[in-house]
Amino acid sequence: MAMLRDATKFTCRVCGETLRFDPLDESTYTTKTDHEDFFGLQLATYRVAHDSGHERHYNSVVVDQRGFFRGHRDAYSEPLRKVEAITDRDYWLFHEEQPSQSSDKFTLALLISRKHRWIIDIVCPEQLNAPELATIVMDRVEEAWRIYNTLPKLMETRLADLDVHVWASDSRVLVVSFKDLSLLKTFEGMVNQIIDNQEESVVPRRQILSLIFRIIEQKSSPSYEILSRILTEDMLFATLHTPYEDRIPNIVEQTGKKMPIAKEILGPLLRGYTTLIELLENKYCDRYEEIYGLVDFVNRRRLLG
Ligand SMILES: [Zn+2]
C-alpha cells in the first residue's frame, strides 16, 4: 500500500487550529511510538508541537500506516517563557471537554504533576478551588519529605473539612477523598500505576482516569492488568474504519459465535462509527473485560489485515 505523501492533518485539542505534519519527515514531529498490529492496522503515535501566542501546544495523535489521523491520545500546553519564581507555586487545571463527574464513592480525586504543574480533576465538586487545593497538598507532601527519613507512600491528612488520602511519587501526587472507605483496598491496587508514570511528557486523559475510577467503584476485584492497559494503550482513541468493509458481516458472525459481545460492538467498531473508549465510557463500562477479550481474540487470530 503506497504511503500518502499528503501531510497528516488534525485539530489541536488545545486551541482548535488545524495542524499538519508529515510522518515521513522527522523534523515535523517530536517523537514517534510504534504499536503492535491492531485490528489489521499498524498504528503509531506521534507527538507534534506548535506555538500559539505565549504557549507551546503539544498533541499526541494516533496515525495509521497510510498516514491517516485516527485519534488523539493527549494534548497539553506549556508557557514559552520560563515561569518565574513567584509563580512557582501555581498549578493549572488541565481542561478537557468533559466536566468532572460527581461520584457516589469519591468526594474528590485530583492528580497533580509536580514538574509540569498540571492538575487533572477526576472528581471535583464545583465549589472547590482545585489549584489552591493542589498548592496546599504539595506543601503537605514537601513537609512530609522534610520530616521523614523514609518517605511514607500514603499519607492521611485533612484539608479544610475534607479527610484525604495522598499518594506521592517523584513526579506525581494523587489526592483522594473517599465517601466509602471500603474502596481503599481495591483502589490501592491501581495507585502505583497512576502515580509512577513511565513517560513524564504524557498527560493521562481525564476520560481515562474517570473510567478507571468508575470500574473500581463497581468492581471489588477488578482486573488490574486490564486497568493498566486502559491507562497506557493508545488505540482506545483510534477510529478504526477498516479497509475490509465487505468482510465485516462475516467476521462479526464468526467472532460472535465465540465472543457474544462481538455481535453488539464489532460491526460499529470496524466501520469506525465508534471507538473503544466511547464503548467503555458509556454502555459497556462494566463489560470492560469482555471488550478486551474481544480485542485480543481479533488480534491474536489476525482476523483483519
Ligand atoms: Zn494549539
Image (cartoon, rainbow, N blue to C red):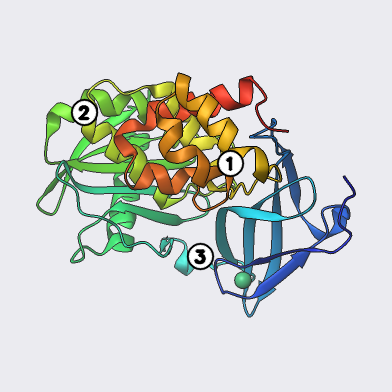
Identify the residue under disc 3: 85
Residue 92 in which image quadrant: bottom left
Q: Gap in Å between the C-alphas at discs 2 and 1?
A: 29 Å
- How far apart, in angstroms, are the residues tagged by discs 1 and 3? 39 Å
Q: Is mark 1 within 8 Å of ligand 1?
A: no
**How many neighbours does mark 3 have within 10 angstroms: few (below 14), some (14-19), or many (20 or more)?**
few
Q: Residues within 10 Å of mark 2 (few under 14, many from 20)?
A: few
Q: Quadrant of ligand 1?
A: bottom right
Residue 24 drawn at (x, y percent): 88, 52
Look at label 2 and name its amino acid: Leu
Residue count near mark 1 (Cα–Cα under 10 Å), binned few <14, some 14–19, many ≥20 = many
Label 3, secondary structure: give it: helix
- The residue that label 1 is drawn on is 235
Is 123 drawn above or below residue 143 in the view shown? below
Circles 1, 3 touching at the beta carbon (< 8 Å)? no
Quadrant of the rendered image containing residue 303: top right
- For residue 184, which quarter of the picture? top left
